Amino acid sequence: MTPEDLVSRLAPVRVPEDFARFGLQDALAVIALGLLGGLLLSIMLRGLTRPRPHAIHQTRARIAALSGLAPQERVAGLALLLRELGEDIPPQMRMALYDPDAPADPIVLEAAILAAARRRGR
């Protein structure tokens, strides 16, 4: 028996008439699935394309948050921020961390932090 003979002996496929029609319920189901797919796609795209703040802007915000602290606490916070960026504390500021009477100029640390953030942002 050849494949053509086998195919010719098969009975025609009978589908109930309700399954063969494309009705209003089918159209609404397709629209609902399309809306659901679009919603999921928009959520994924929003998560992937939202703007992320640059490292330099985040660093400036953290420096500004430390500006209201007492001088010794501010220097310690700035030193911690510089350490988080993977940089060493400038030699002229090391003594200010441990000696409260040593002159502490936070501008030196702020400049070092901003320079490290710029290098890291590249």
Image (tube, rainbow, N blue to C red):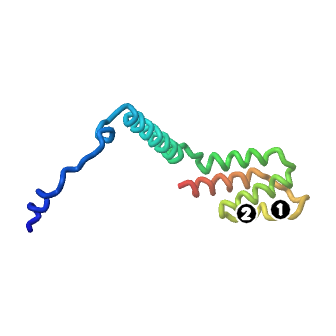
Mark 2 in CB contact with mark 1 (< 8 angstroms): yes
Residue shown at 65% from the left, 48% from the top: 58
Which amino acid type is marked by label 2?
Ile
Q: Position of residue 81 (x, y in %)?
A: 72, 57
Estimate the x, y position of residue 94 in percent, counting from the top left: 79, 64
Report the side of 73 relative to 2 (left or right): right
In the image: residue 24, left or right of residue 91: left
Q: Crowding near pointer 1: few (<14 within 10 Å), some, many (20+)?
A: some
Q: Is residue 73 left or right of residue 63?
A: right
Q: Amino acid at mark 1?
A: Leu
User: Which quadrant is home to the N terminus?
Assistant: bottom left
Q: In terms of image quadrants, where is residue 88? A: bottom right
Corner quadrant of residue 101: bottom right
Disc 1 on helix, strand or loop? helix
Q: Of residues 44 and 77, which is closer to you in this image? A: 44
Q: Which residue bears the numbered disc 2?
A: 89
Q: Residue at x 85, y 54 (%)?
A: 73
Residue 113: image location, x then y, percent: 68, 55
Judging by the rendered image, the residue that carries numbered circle 1 is 97
